Protein backbone atom coordinates (compact mmCIF):
# COMPACT_ATOMS: atom_id res chain seq x y z
CA UNK A 1 0.00 0.00 0.00
CA UNK A 2 2.87 2.35 0.83
CA UNK A 3 4.36 1.73 -2.61
CA UNK A 4 1.07 2.52 -4.35
CA UNK A 5 0.56 5.62 -2.17
CA UNK A 6 4.06 6.85 -2.95
CA UNK A 7 3.54 6.17 -6.66
CA UNK A 8 0.20 8.03 -6.62
CA UNK A 9 1.79 10.99 -4.84
CA UNK A 10 4.68 11.09 -7.31
CA UNK A 11 2.36 10.93 -10.31
CA UNK A 12 0.22 13.73 -8.90
CA UNK A 13 3.32 15.86 -8.29
CA UNK A 14 4.53 15.26 -11.84
CA UNK A 15 1.14 16.15 -13.30
CA UNK A 16 0.99 19.37 -11.27
CA UNK A 17 4.54 20.27 -12.31
CA UNK A 18 3.76 19.66 -15.97
CA UNK A 19 0.57 21.72 -15.78
CA UNK A 20 2.44 24.55 -14.10
CA UNK A 21 5.15 24.50 -16.80
CA UNK A 22 2.51 24.46 -19.54
CA UNK A 23 0.74 27.46 -17.99
CA UNK A 24 4.06 29.22 -17.57
CA UNK A 25 4.95 28.58 -21.20
CA UNK A 26 1.52 29.73 -22.36
CA UNK A 27 1.80 32.85 -20.20
CA UNK A 28 5.21 33.78 -21.63
CA UNK A 29 3.97 33.07 -25.14
CA UNK A 30 0.92 35.25 -24.68
CA UNK A 31 2.98 38.13 -23.32
CA UNK A 32 5.30 37.91 -26.33
CA UNK A 33 2.28 38.30 -28.64
CA UNK A 34 1.70 41.78 -27.15
CA UNK A 35 5.26 43.06 -27.54
CA UNK A 36 4.12 46.34 -29.16
CA UNK A 37 1.94 47.36 -26.21
CA UNK A 38 2.76 50.50 -24.20
CA UNK A 39 5.41 50.11 -21.45
CA UNK A 40 4.69 49.12 -17.89
CA UNK A 41 6.00 47.20 -14.86
CA UNK A 42 7.47 43.78 -15.56
CA UNK A 43 4.82 41.08 -14.93
CA UNK A 44 5.41 37.86 -13.07
CA UNK A 45 4.53 34.57 -14.78
CA UNK A 46 0.87 33.55 -14.39
CA UNK A 47 -0.08 36.27 -11.89
CA UNK A 48 1.13 39.32 -13.80
CA UNK A 49 1.19 42.49 -11.67
CA UNK A 50 -1.72 41.71 -9.35
CA UNK A 51 0.48 41.43 -6.24
CA UNK A 52 2.09 44.81 -6.84
CA UNK A 53 -0.82 46.98 -5.72
CA UNK A 54 -3.44 47.26 -2.99
CA UNK A 55 -6.76 45.92 -4.26
CA UNK A 56 -8.70 48.65 -2.47
CA UNK A 57 -6.46 51.41 -3.83
CA UNK A 58 -5.76 50.15 -7.35
CA UNK A 59 -6.32 53.54 -8.97
CA UNK A 60 -3.52 55.08 -6.86
CA UNK A 61 -1.12 52.46 -8.19
CA UNK A 62 -2.25 53.29 -11.72
CA UNK A 63 -1.63 57.00 -11.07
CA UNK A 64 1.90 56.20 -9.92
CA UNK A 65 2.49 54.15 -13.06
CA UNK A 66 1.27 56.98 -15.29
CA UNK A 67 3.77 59.33 -13.65
CA UNK A 68 6.56 56.85 -14.33
CA UNK A 69 5.66 55.49 -17.77
CA UNK A 70 3.44 58.17 -19.30
CA UNK A 71 -0.19 58.55 -20.34
CA UNK A 72 -0.49 55.00 -21.74
CA UNK A 73 0.67 52.13 -19.54
CA UNK A 74 0.30 48.35 -19.69
CA UNK A 75 -0.22 46.12 -16.67
CA UNK A 76 -1.01 42.42 -16.57
CA UNK A 77 -3.84 40.95 -14.53
CA UNK A 78 -2.80 37.32 -14.53
CA UNK A 79 -2.23 36.61 -18.26
CA UNK A 80 -4.49 39.43 -19.45
CA UNK A 81 -2.95 42.73 -20.57
CA UNK A 82 -4.71 45.94 -19.52
CA UNK A 83 -3.87 49.33 -21.03
CA UNK A 84 -4.40 52.30 -18.72
CA UNK A 85 -5.14 55.66 -20.34
CA UNK A 86 -4.53 58.71 -18.13
CA UNK A 87 -4.46 62.46 -18.51
CA UNK A 88 -6.99 64.77 -20.15
CA UNK A 89 -5.38 64.88 -23.60
CA UNK A 90 -4.81 61.12 -23.87
CA UNK A 91 -8.38 60.37 -22.75
CA UNK A 92 -9.72 62.91 -25.23
CA UNK A 93 -7.60 61.47 -28.05
CA UNK A 94 -8.72 57.89 -27.39
CA UNK A 95 -12.24 58.06 -25.98
CA UNK A 96 -13.38 60.81 -28.38
CA UNK A 97 -10.88 60.96 -31.23
CA UNK A 98 -10.75 57.17 -31.57
CA UNK A 99 -14.17 56.46 -30.10
CA UNK A 100 -15.06 53.67 -32.52
CA UNK A 101 -11.80 51.80 -31.93
CA UNK A 102 -12.10 52.14 -28.13
CA UNK A 103 -15.89 51.66 -27.95
CA UNK A 104 -16.02 48.01 -26.88
CA UNK A 105 -17.36 47.13 -23.42
CA UNK A 106 -15.63 44.55 -21.25
CA UNK A 107 -17.78 41.67 -20.11
CA UNK A 108 -16.58 41.36 -16.52
CA UNK A 109 -17.63 38.01 -15.03
CA UNK A 110 -19.13 39.77 -11.99
CA UNK A 111 -21.19 42.10 -14.17
CA UNK A 112 -22.18 39.24 -16.44
CA UNK A 113 -23.60 37.42 -13.42
CA UNK A 114 -26.00 40.31 -12.93
CA UNK A 115 -26.87 41.12 -16.54
CA UNK A 116 -26.26 37.84 -18.42
CA UNK A 117 -24.87 39.98 -21.24
CA UNK A 118 -28.03 42.04 -21.80
CA UNK A 119 -28.91 45.69 -21.16
CA UNK A 120 -26.39 48.50 -21.77
CA UNK A 121 -23.58 48.23 -19.23
CA UNK A 122 -22.00 45.06 -20.57
CA UNK A 123 -23.02 44.97 -24.23
CA UNK A 124 -21.54 46.04 -27.55
CA UNK A 125 -22.61 46.67 -31.11
CA UNK A 126 -26.23 46.67 -32.20
CA UNK A 127 -27.65 45.58 -28.81
CA UNK A 128 -25.83 48.36 -26.96
CA UNK A 129 -26.87 51.03 -29.47
CA UNK A 130 -30.52 49.89 -29.56
CA UNK A 131 -30.94 49.60 -25.78
CA UNK A 132 -29.16 52.89 -25.19
CA UNK A 133 -31.27 54.68 -27.81
CA UNK A 134 -34.54 53.31 -26.41
CA UNK A 135 -33.59 54.14 -22.81
CA UNK A 136 -32.62 57.74 -23.60
CA UNK A 137 -35.71 58.30 -25.75
CA UNK A 138 -38.06 56.85 -23.13
CA UNK A 139 -36.54 58.83 -20.28
CA UNK A 140 -36.79 61.97 -22.39
CA UNK A 141 -40.46 61.24 -23.05
CA UNK A 142 -40.99 60.79 -19.32
CA UNK A 143 -39.45 64.20 -18.76
CA UNK A 144 -35.88 63.50 -17.66
CA UNK A 145 -34.73 66.84 -16.34
CA UNK A 146 -38.22 68.23 -16.78
CA UNK A 147 -41.29 68.64 -14.65
CA UNK A 148 -42.67 65.09 -14.38
CA UNK A 149 -39.54 63.49 -12.96
CA UNK A 150 -38.76 66.68 -11.03
CA UNK A 151 -42.06 66.20 -9.18
CA UNK A 152 -40.95 62.73 -8.13
CA UNK A 153 -37.62 64.07 -6.90
CA UNK A 154 -39.32 66.83 -4.92
CA UNK A 155 -41.76 64.38 -3.36
CA UNK A 156 -38.91 62.17 -2.17
CA UNK A 157 -36.98 65.21 -0.91
CA UNK A 158 -40.00 66.30 1.12
CA UNK A 159 -40.32 62.82 2.59
CA UNK A 160 -36.58 62.77 3.37
CA UNK A 161 -36.76 66.07 5.24
CA UNK A 162 -39.80 64.80 7.15
CA UNK A 163 -37.88 61.73 8.29
CA UNK A 164 -34.87 63.81 9.34
CA UNK A 165 -37.08 66.11 11.39
CA UNK A 166 -38.22 63.11 13.44
CA UNK A 167 -34.82 63.06 15.13
CA UNK A 168 -35.46 66.55 16.56
CA UNK A 169 -31.82 67.59 16.27
CA UNK A 170 -30.35 64.34 17.63
CA UNK A 171 -27.56 62.55 15.78
CA UNK A 172 -28.49 60.02 13.10
CA UNK A 173 -26.91 58.14 10.20
CA UNK A 174 -28.44 59.44 6.93
CA UNK A 175 -27.18 56.59 4.73
CA UNK A 176 -30.30 54.40 4.57
CA UNK A 177 -32.85 57.18 4.24
CA UNK A 178 -30.86 58.87 1.46
CA UNK A 179 -30.50 55.57 -0.42
CA UNK A 180 -34.21 54.89 0.04
CA UNK A 181 -35.14 58.29 -1.36
CA UNK A 182 -32.91 57.93 -4.42
CA UNK A 183 -34.07 54.37 -5.07
CA UNK A 184 -37.71 55.41 -4.87
CA UNK A 185 -37.20 57.96 -7.63
CA UNK A 186 -35.87 55.14 -9.80
CA UNK A 187 -38.75 52.88 -8.73
CA UNK A 188 -41.26 55.55 -9.73
CA UNK A 189 -39.71 55.70 -13.20
CA UNK A 190 -39.23 51.96 -13.69
CA UNK A 191 -42.19 50.41 -11.83
CA UNK A 192 -44.56 53.36 -11.85
CA UNK A 193 -44.79 53.62 -8.06
CA UNK A 194 -42.71 54.21 -4.97
CA UNK A 195 -42.25 51.81 -2.05
CA UNK A 196 -42.64 52.37 1.65
CA UNK A 197 -39.19 52.30 3.21
CA UNK A 198 -40.02 49.20 5.28
CA UNK A 199 -41.38 47.21 2.34
CA UNK A 200 -39.53 43.82 2.37
CA UNK A 201 -39.13 43.71 -1.43
CA UNK A 202 -37.80 47.27 -1.49
CA UNK A 203 -35.31 46.54 1.28
CA UNK A 204 -34.18 43.38 -0.52
CA UNK A 205 -33.53 45.26 -3.79
CA UNK A 206 -31.57 47.96 -2.00
CA UNK A 207 -29.52 45.45 -0.03
CA UNK A 208 -28.69 43.53 -3.20
CA UNK A 209 -27.60 46.70 -5.04
CA UNK A 210 -25.44 47.75 -2.10
CA UNK A 211 -23.81 44.33 -1.73
CA UNK A 212 -23.24 44.17 -5.48
CA UNK A 213 -21.46 47.54 -5.48
CA UNK A 214 -19.35 46.57 -2.48
CA UNK A 215 -18.41 43.26 -4.11
CA UNK A 216 -17.32 45.02 -7.32
CA UNK A 217 -14.99 47.23 -5.30
CA UNK A 218 -13.65 44.49 -3.03
CA UNK A 219 -10.46 42.41 -3.49
CA UNK A 220 -12.67 39.30 -3.71
CA UNK A 221 -14.65 40.84 -6.57
CA UNK A 222 -11.47 41.76 -8.43
CA UNK A 223 -10.02 38.28 -7.99
CA UNK A 224 -13.31 36.78 -9.20
CA UNK A 225 -13.12 38.90 -12.34
CA UNK A 226 -9.66 37.44 -13.04
CA UNK A 227 -10.26 33.83 -11.96
CA UNK A 228 -14.07 33.35 -12.03
CA UNK A 229 -14.07 29.57 -12.34
CA UNK A 230 -11.49 29.11 -9.62
CA UNK A 231 -13.14 31.49 -7.13
CA UNK A 232 -16.52 29.85 -7.80
CA UNK A 233 -15.14 26.64 -6.32
CA UNK A 234 -14.61 28.25 -2.91
CA UNK A 235 -17.21 29.37 -0.37
CA UNK A 236 -17.68 33.08 0.24
CA UNK A 237 -20.01 36.06 0.15
CA UNK A 238 -20.05 36.00 -3.65
CA UNK A 239 -22.33 32.94 -3.61
CA UNK A 240 -24.86 34.72 -1.41
CA UNK A 241 -24.73 37.72 -3.74
CA UNK A 242 -25.31 35.52 -6.79
CA UNK A 243 -28.39 34.00 -5.15
CA UNK A 244 -29.75 37.48 -4.41
CA UNK A 245 -29.04 38.63 -7.96
CA UNK A 246 -31.07 35.69 -9.26
CA UNK A 247 -33.98 36.58 -6.94
CA UNK A 248 -33.81 40.22 -8.05
CA UNK A 249 -34.00 39.15 -11.69
CA UNK A 250 -36.98 36.92 -10.94
CA UNK A 251 -38.79 39.86 -9.35
CA UNK A 252 -38.12 42.07 -12.39
CA UNK A 253 -39.29 39.27 -14.69
CA UNK A 254 -42.56 38.97 -12.75
CA UNK A 255 -43.09 42.75 -12.94
CA UNK A 256 -42.54 42.65 -16.70
CA UNK A 257 -44.80 39.68 -17.35
CA UNK A 258 -47.55 41.26 -15.25
CA UNK A 259 -47.68 44.15 -17.72
CA UNK A 260 -47.78 42.07 -20.91
CA UNK A 261 -51.28 42.46 -22.41
CA UNK A 262 -52.23 44.65 -19.44
CA UNK A 263 -51.13 48.15 -20.53
CA UNK A 264 -54.14 50.43 -19.97
CA UNK A 265 -53.18 53.19 -22.42
CA UNK A 266 -50.74 52.31 -25.22
CA UNK A 267 -50.40 55.98 -26.14
CA UNK A 268 -49.23 56.92 -22.65
CA UNK A 269 -47.20 54.24 -20.81
CA UNK A 270 -47.03 55.02 -17.11
CA UNK A 271 -43.55 53.61 -16.49
CA UNK A 272 -40.40 52.36 -18.22
CA UNK A 273 -41.48 48.70 -18.14
CA UNK A 274 -44.78 49.50 -19.85
CA UNK A 275 -42.94 51.45 -22.57
CA UNK A 276 -40.64 48.48 -23.15
CA UNK A 277 -43.51 45.98 -23.20
CA UNK A 278 -45.25 48.05 -25.88
CA UNK A 279 -42.04 47.98 -27.93
CA UNK A 280 -41.89 44.19 -27.46
CA UNK A 281 -45.39 43.91 -28.91
CA UNK A 282 -44.48 46.18 -31.79
CA UNK A 283 -41.49 44.00 -32.74
CA UNK A 284 -42.93 40.58 -31.89
CA UNK A 285 -42.59 39.39 -35.50
CA UNK A 286 -38.97 40.50 -35.80
CA UNK A 287 -36.77 37.41 -35.23
CA UNK A 288 -33.73 39.62 -34.53
CA UNK A 289 -35.41 41.99 -32.11
CA UNK A 290 -33.61 43.07 -28.97
CA UNK A 291 -36.89 43.81 -27.25
CA UNK A 292 -37.23 40.79 -24.99
CA UNK A 293 -37.58 40.00 -21.30
CA UNK A 294 -33.84 39.43 -20.87
CA UNK A 295 -33.00 42.96 -22.01
CA UNK A 296 -35.67 44.75 -19.96
CA UNK A 297 -34.66 42.89 -16.80
CA UNK A 298 -31.02 43.84 -17.30
CA UNK A 299 -31.97 47.44 -18.11
CA UNK A 300 -33.86 47.63 -14.81
CA UNK A 301 -30.77 46.33 -13.02
CA UNK A 302 -28.62 48.85 -14.91
CA UNK A 303 -30.81 51.68 -13.63
CA UNK A 304 -30.60 50.49 -10.04
CA UNK A 305 -26.95 49.52 -9.94
CA UNK A 306 -25.70 52.57 -11.86
CA UNK A 307 -28.08 55.07 -10.30
CA UNK A 308 -28.95 54.22 -6.71
CA UNK A 309 -25.57 53.77 -5.06
CA UNK A 310 -23.74 56.42 -7.06
CA UNK A 311 -26.36 59.11 -6.52
CA UNK A 312 -26.93 58.36 -2.84
CA UNK A 313 -23.16 58.22 -2.24
CA UNK A 314 -22.76 61.65 -3.83
CA UNK A 315 -25.53 63.13 -1.66
CA UNK A 316 -24.09 61.60 1.51
CA UNK A 317 -20.63 62.89 0.61
CA UNK A 318 -22.11 66.34 0.00
CA UNK A 319 -23.70 66.34 3.47
CA UNK A 320 -20.43 65.26 5.04
CA UNK A 321 -18.50 68.00 3.24
CA UNK A 322 -21.03 70.61 4.38
CA UNK A 323 -20.41 69.47 7.95
CA UNK A 324 -16.69 69.69 7.35
CA UNK A 325 -16.93 73.18 5.83
CA UNK A 326 -19.65 75.13 7.69
CA UNK A 327 -18.60 78.37 5.97
CA UNK A 328 -19.41 76.86 2.58
CA UNK A 329 -22.65 75.40 3.96
CA UNK A 330 -23.68 78.84 5.23
CA UNK A 331 -22.96 80.48 1.88
CA UNK A 332 -25.01 77.84 0.02
CA UNK A 333 -27.92 78.31 2.42
CA UNK A 334 -27.72 82.08 2.02
CA UNK A 335 -27.84 81.83 -1.76
CA UNK A 336 -30.79 79.40 -1.69
CA UNK A 337 -32.67 81.68 0.72
CA UNK A 338 -32.08 84.63 -1.60
CA UNK A 339 -33.13 82.86 -4.80
CA UNK A 340 -35.73 80.33 -3.63
CA UNK A 341 -36.74 81.43 -0.16
CA UNK A 342 -38.26 79.02 2.35
CA UNK A 343 -41.86 79.12 1.09
CA UNK A 344 -41.30 76.74 -1.84
CA UNK A 345 -39.00 73.95 -3.02
CA UNK A 346 -36.09 74.53 -5.40
CA UNK A 347 -36.75 73.61 -9.03
CA UNK A 348 -34.58 73.04 -12.07
CA UNK A 349 -35.44 76.54 -13.27
CA UNK A 350 -33.63 77.97 -10.22
CA UNK A 351 -30.32 76.41 -11.19
CA UNK A 352 -29.21 79.31 -13.41
CA UNK A 353 -29.52 81.68 -10.45
CA UNK A 354 -27.81 79.36 -7.95
CA UNK A 355 -24.28 79.94 -9.24
CA UNK A 356 -22.38 79.18 -6.04
CA UNK A 357 -24.58 76.19 -5.16
CA UNK A 358 -24.00 74.78 -8.64
CA UNK A 359 -20.24 75.13 -8.21
CA UNK A 360 -20.41 73.37 -4.84
CA UNK A 361 -22.33 70.42 -6.30
CA UNK A 362 -19.80 70.09 -9.12
CA UNK A 363 -16.93 70.31 -6.68
CA UNK A 364 -18.45 67.56 -4.53
CA UNK A 365 -18.36 65.25 -7.52
CA UNK A 366 -14.85 66.29 -8.55
CA UNK A 367 -13.41 66.03 -5.06
CA UNK A 368 -15.18 62.75 -4.29
CA UNK A 369 -13.84 61.18 -7.49
CA UNK A 370 -16.71 58.69 -7.40
CA UNK A 371 -15.44 56.52 -10.25
CA UNK A 372 -11.62 56.79 -10.37
CA UNK A 373 -11.66 54.27 -13.20
CA UNK A 374 -14.43 54.60 -15.76
CA UNK A 375 -16.33 51.61 -17.12
CA UNK A 376 -13.60 49.40 -18.68
CA UNK A 377 -13.45 49.39 -22.46
CA UNK A 378 -12.23 46.83 -24.96
CA UNK A 379 -10.52 47.42 -28.29
CA UNK A 380 -12.74 46.79 -31.31
CA UNK A 381 -9.75 46.39 -33.66
CA UNK A 382 -5.96 46.60 -33.74
CA UNK A 383 -5.19 50.28 -33.16
CA UNK A 384 -2.05 52.41 -33.29
CA UNK A 385 -1.82 55.13 -30.69
CA UNK A 386 1.11 57.21 -29.49
CA UNK A 387 3.57 54.92 -31.27
CA UNK A 388 2.18 51.70 -29.77
CA UNK A 389 -0.09 48.97 -31.10
CA UNK A 390 -3.08 47.99 -28.96
CA UNK A 391 -4.51 44.71 -30.32
CA UNK A 392 -8.18 43.96 -30.80
CA UNK A 393 -9.79 42.67 -27.60
CA UNK A 394 -7.31 44.40 -25.28
CA UNK A 395 -8.88 45.70 -22.06
CA UNK A 396 -8.60 49.48 -21.54
CA UNK A 397 -9.02 51.37 -18.26
CA UNK A 398 -9.82 55.11 -18.65
CA UNK A 399 -8.26 56.63 -15.50
CA UNK A 400 -10.62 59.53 -14.77
CA UNK A 401 -8.92 60.24 -11.46
CA UNK A 402 -5.85 61.47 -13.35
CA UNK A 403 -7.94 64.31 -14.79
CA UNK A 404 -9.90 65.25 -11.68
CA UNK A 405 -6.69 65.61 -9.66
CA UNK A 406 -4.50 67.32 -12.27
CA UNK A 407 -2.99 70.57 -10.87
CA UNK A 408 -2.75 71.94 -14.43
CA UNK A 409 -6.53 71.80 -14.78
CA UNK A 410 -7.78 72.88 -11.35
CA UNK A 411 -7.04 75.77 -9.00
CA UNK A 412 -6.89 73.57 -5.91
CA UNK A 413 -7.08 69.90 -6.97
CA UNK A 414 -6.21 68.35 -3.61
CA UNK A 415 -8.72 70.36 -1.56
CA UNK A 416 -12.48 70.69 -1.51
CA UNK A 417 -12.81 74.16 -2.99
CA UNK A 418 -15.83 75.45 -4.98
CA UNK A 419 -13.47 78.07 -6.44
CA UNK A 420 -12.49 75.33 -8.89
CA UNK A 421 -15.80 76.06 -10.66
CA UNK A 422 -16.04 79.84 -10.21
CA UNK A 423 -14.73 82.56 -12.50
CA UNK A 424 -13.35 85.95 -11.49
CA UNK A 425 -16.92 87.28 -11.19
CA UNK A 426 -17.97 84.48 -8.82
CA UNK A 427 -20.15 82.94 -11.52
CA UNK A 428 -20.28 79.22 -12.22
CA UNK A 429 -17.67 78.24 -14.80
CA UNK A 430 -17.70 75.01 -16.76
CA UNK A 431 -14.51 73.02 -16.98
CA UNK A 432 -13.96 70.51 -19.76
CA UNK A 433 -11.93 68.46 -17.29
CA UNK A 434 -15.01 67.78 -15.21
CA UNK A 435 -15.65 64.42 -16.43
CA UNK A 436 -28.42 72.92 3.82
CA UNK A 437 -27.34 71.09 6.69
CA UNK A 438 -26.89 70.99 10.45
CA UNK A 439 -24.02 70.58 12.84
CA UNK A 440 -21.42 67.85 13.02
CA UNK A 441 -21.10 65.43 15.90
CA UNK A 442 -17.40 66.18 16.05
CA UNK A 443 -15.39 69.35 15.35
CA UNK A 444 -15.18 69.96 11.58
CA UNK A 445 -11.40 69.75 11.58
CA UNK A 446 -11.62 66.16 12.85
CA UNK A 447 -13.95 64.91 10.10
CA UNK A 448 -12.40 62.49 7.64
CA UNK A 449 -14.01 63.06 4.24
CA UNK A 450 -11.84 60.57 2.36
CA UNK A 451 -14.17 58.08 0.60
CA UNK A 452 -13.70 54.35 1.05
CA UNK A 453 -13.68 51.33 -1.31
CA UNK A 454 -11.42 52.73 -3.99
CA UNK A 455 -11.45 50.46 -7.01
CA UNK A 456 -14.50 50.31 -9.23
CA UNK A 457 -16.15 53.01 -7.15
CA UNK A 458 -15.82 55.14 -4.04
CA UNK A 459 -18.36 55.59 -1.25
CA UNK A 460 -18.60 58.05 1.66
CA UNK A 461 -17.57 56.98 5.12
CA UNK A 462 -20.24 56.01 7.66
CA UNK A 463 -21.10 58.99 9.83
CA UNK A 464 -23.83 60.62 11.91
CA UNK A 465 -25.17 64.13 11.55
CA UNK A 466 -27.74 66.52 12.99
CA UNK A 467 -30.59 68.05 10.96
CA UNK A 468 -31.86 71.20 12.64
CA UNK A 469 -34.69 73.21 11.00
CA UNK A 470 -33.71 76.82 10.28
CA UNK A 471 -35.92 79.75 11.20
Image (spheres, helix red, strand yellow):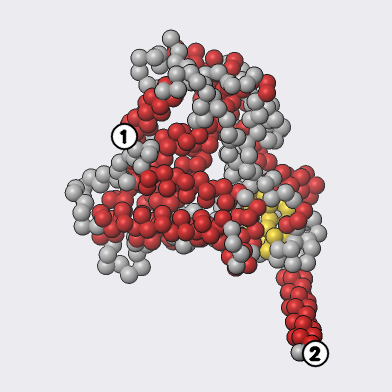
Q: Residue 227: which quarter of the image?
A: bottom right
In the picture provided, is 28 more to the left or to the right than 102? right
Q: Quadrant of the C terminus?
A: top left
Q: Observer-nearest residue: 141 or 225?
A: 225
Mark positioned earlier in the residue sequence (1 or 2): 2
User: What is the count of numbered marks?
Assistant: 2
Task: Give the side of residue 111 with respect to residue 22, left or right.
Answer: left
The answer to which of 82 and 111 lies nearer the viewer is 111
Asked whether 32 or 273 is in front, the reply is 273
Q: Confirm whether residue 437 shows in the render.
A: no
Q: What is the spatial separation of the Cα atoms under label 1 and label 2, in whole angstroms?
A: 80 Å
Looking at the image, residue 268 sits to the left or right of residue 397; the answer is: left
Which residue is farthest top? 471
Q: Residue furthest left?
A: 264
Q: Please rate how many residues cluster around mark 1, counting C-alpha atoms within 10 Å: few if below 14, some from 14 to 19, many from 20.
A: few
Counting from the top left corner in percent of width and height, residue 427 is at 54, 19
Q: Residue at x 57, y 30 (%)?
A: 463
Which marked residue is nearer to the observer: mark 1 or mark 2? 2
Left or right, residue 280 beside residue 417: left
Identify the element where label 1 is drawn: helix
Q: Quadrant of residue 393?
A: bottom right
Decide if residue 300 is in sight here: yes
**Compared to 13, does 3 lie above or below?**
below
Identify the residue under disc 1: 148
At x 64%, y 19%, the residue is: 443
Q: Looking at the rendering, in which quadrant would you find the N terminus?
A: bottom right
Q: What residue did someone put label 2 on?
A: 3
Percent position (x, y) of residue 213? 54, 48
What residue do we see at 81% from left, 59% from top? 42
Residue 446, picture quadrant:
top right
Amino acid sequence: MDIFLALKTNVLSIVMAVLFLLLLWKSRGKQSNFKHLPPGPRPLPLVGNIFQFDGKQAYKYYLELSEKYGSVVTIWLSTTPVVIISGYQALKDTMIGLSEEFSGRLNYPMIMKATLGYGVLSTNGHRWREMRRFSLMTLKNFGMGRRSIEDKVQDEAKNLVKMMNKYKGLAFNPADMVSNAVANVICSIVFGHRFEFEDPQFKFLLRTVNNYFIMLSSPLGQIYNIFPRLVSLFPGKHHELFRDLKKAREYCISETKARINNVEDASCPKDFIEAFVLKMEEEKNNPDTEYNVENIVSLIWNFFSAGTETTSSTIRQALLLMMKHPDIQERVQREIDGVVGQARWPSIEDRHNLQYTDSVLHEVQRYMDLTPIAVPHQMMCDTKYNGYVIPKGTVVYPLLSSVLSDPKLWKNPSSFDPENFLDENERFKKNDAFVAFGMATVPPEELDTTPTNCSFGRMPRIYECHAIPRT
